[in-house]
Image (tube, helix red, strand yellow):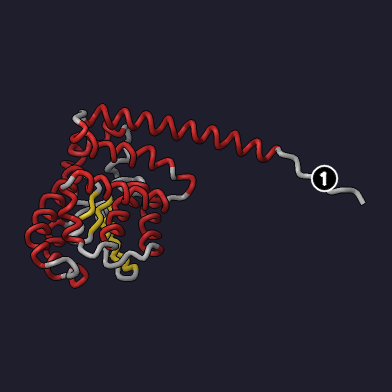
Amino acid sequence: MSLEKKVLEIGTNTLEIKRDDPISRSLSFIGNLPTKLLFLSTKIGSYPKEETQDYVQKYLEDSGLENTTVRIGHSRIFKDLYRLFKDDRLKKTSLLGRILLGIPTTLLGGLQSKLTRSDHYNPFTKTATVYSNVPAIGLHELGHAKDFEEKNSPTLYALARSFFPVALYQEYKASRKAYKSLKEKDKGQSYRYLIPAFASYVSPVAGIASVPLVMTTHLVSNAYRGIKSIFKGLFSRKKDKTPEPVPPSV
């Protein structure tokens, strides 16, 4: 597989498309297996293909998002640490916030993302890392970026994430923004991936093991999606069969 990098500048945003080195990919394949099994999907943590890349690029073009870096298929931990203090686009976050919160977030969050191929947003480096070949998941991470951009104090908003209700609120906001950006044919990905992922944040507080809760949510949300599609199809057919009114004869 080629390691050639593709870089696009989209307004004030940067989109980098590349693969991690072979050693990282081998280690992360093992680290990503539990998540693949949990969601019963090989698309989780696999290399984002053209459709996912196009969704990400379009979001950067149309959403008004600014000063954000998106890394597709790879992460750059030490480069992001450097950017934390040298990239002028990150100066909105306070220096103290970048030192006390930005450094550990970039190191630990970046390392976890790299070794497990997990999709991740770092508000201190304003970097979204997209590893999964699922447009909804990529848009979810960009939804976090947009949500943080709308806040006057990103540092306090990031710190507030340690409180359970705030974390759930942030996850809901990111998923909602992702859902709105999906094409109609792809909105089912929210039920397939985003709702079960949301359940994983609920499990520690609810006192329910993550695996059964996520699996149950996965089954329920997909059953709902199926029922919704059936009824939508039935009503659509009935509407199509409704005869047009005959104009009165002269």
Compared to residue 2, the image places residue 210 above or below, namely above
Position of residue 164 measured from the top left corner of the image (x, y, whole percent): 19, 43
Q: In the drawing, does residue 207 fall left or right of residue 225?
A: left
Position of residue 197 measured from the top left corner of the image (x, y, whole percent): 29, 39
Looking at the picture, tell me which residue is in the foreground, 227 or 134: 227
**Residue at 9% of width from left, 54% of height from top?**
104
Residue for badge 1: 246
Whether residue 24 is visible here, answered yes or no, is no
Position of residue 98 measured from the top left corner of the image (x, y, whole percent): 11, 63
**Residue at 19% of width from left, 47% of height from top?**
113
Whether residue 169 is visible here, answered yes or no, is yes
Q: In the drawing, does residue 70 fall left or right of residue 162?
A: right
Q: Residues within 10 Å of mark 1 (few under 14, many from 20)?
A: few
**Residue at 20% of width from left, 54% of height from top?**
75
Looking at the picture, tell me which residue is in the foreground, 4 or 214: 214
**Residue at 26% of width from left, 62% of height from top?**
151
Q: In the drawing, does residue 178 fall left or right of residue 30?
A: right
Name which quarter of the figure residue 154 lies in.
bottom left
Position of residue 242 measured from the top left corner of the image (x, y, whole percent): 71, 39
Compared to residue 87, the image places residue 58 above or below, namely above
Name which quarter of the figure residue 60 lies in.
bottom left
Q: How many marks are shown on the rendered structure?
A: 1
Tag 1, which secondary structure?
A: loop
Name which quarter of the figure residue 236 lies in.
top right
Compared to residue 156, the image places residue 222 above or below, namely above
Q: Residue furthest right?
A: 250
Q: In the drawing, does residue 166 fall left or right of residue 216?
A: left
- Residue kind at label 1, given as amino acid type: Val
Looking at the picture, tell me which residue is in the foreground, 134 or 145: 145
Compared to residue 207, the image places residue 14 above or below, namely below
